[in-house]
Image (spheres, rainbow, N blue to C red):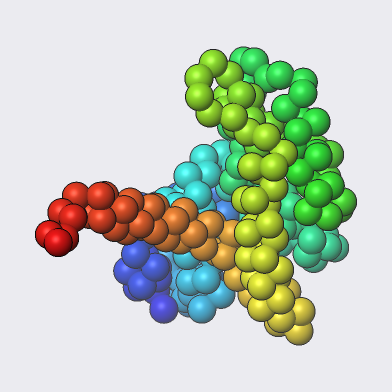
Amino acid sequence: MLVSELAERAGVPLATVKYYLREGLLPAGVTTGPRRAEYAEAHLRRLRVLRLLREVGEVPVTSLRQVVDALDDEELPVHEVMTLVADVISARPEPENQVPGSLDTVDAVLAQVGWDLVRAESIDRQRLAELVTLLNGPGPLAASVEVLGLYAGIADQLARAEIALVSQSTDRAELLEQMVTGSVVYGQVFVLLRQLGHEHHHARLTTAARRPEPVT
């Protein structure tokens, strides 16, 4: 397919595709003539991954290089690529304040659920500690080990199921693209389903509260 068709099929502006090509984020196509090149399904898959990282994962363009380099490094173990992508997706500016005890709370939760293989430098671990700091500040909210453990238990079941669906026999490039897509998109799917559940159950609760008592 030509670059214009590639852009159309991926739902990405042509100018963006050309930018990715110039920056090496998208591999060059096969030259078939002056200023003409053909692109394959592998280009389409890569372009879709870049789109998801940008539009859903909100990964800065400057950070896409880290992801692409990791995806293309055949000597880098798949697990290391997955953790790097997780760090890139979760990266945020350094917090102004973080209570040291927040990391202790997070680590207690990880130990409770049995996640002893999480990296100490994981950005997700740091981000969770930031949220614990916010929740344990002034106000009625609190993030105890017991409360967080409830969430961790549900997350463990989901994570086990998702990892079990990953076929290790899949081509490395395709496997990594699937894992990146799953991390970005299904993370948002879970958030949205949870919010929809809140809407339903709260409406059900308030409807029941407004229902008049039967006349006897």
Residue 212 in which image quadrant: bottom left
In the image, residue 143 above or below residue 215:
above
Q: Nearer the viewer, residue 23 or 113?
A: 113
Image label count: 0
In the image, residue 208 above or below residue 110:
below
In the image, residue 109 above or below residue 190:
above
Look at 59% across and 29% down and name the residue there: 142
Q: Nearer the viewer, residue 107 or 29?
A: 107
Look at 64% across and 42% down and name the residue there: 147
In the image, residue 71 above or below residue 130:
below
Look at 26% across and 55% down and name the residue there: 208
Q: Nearer the viewer, residue 25 or 170?
A: 170
Quadrant in which the C terminus is drawn: bottom left
Quadrant in which the N terminus is drawn: bottom left
Q: Position of residue 193 (x, y in %)?
A: 42, 60
Q: Position of residue 149 (x, y in %)?
A: 69, 47
- Image-based side of 88 in relation to 204, left or right: right
From where the camera sits, is residue 26 visible? no
Q: Position of residue 207 (x, y in %)?
A: 22, 54
**Residue positioned most to the left:** 215
From where the camera sits, is residue 194 visible? yes
Residue 81 in which image quadrant: bottom right
**Residue positioned most to the bottom:** 169
Look at 47% across and 76% down and name the residue there: 38
Q: Position of residue 194 (x, y in %)?
A: 44, 56
- Image-based side of 34 in relation to 61, left or right: left
Q: Nearer the viewer, residue 1 or 82?
A: 82
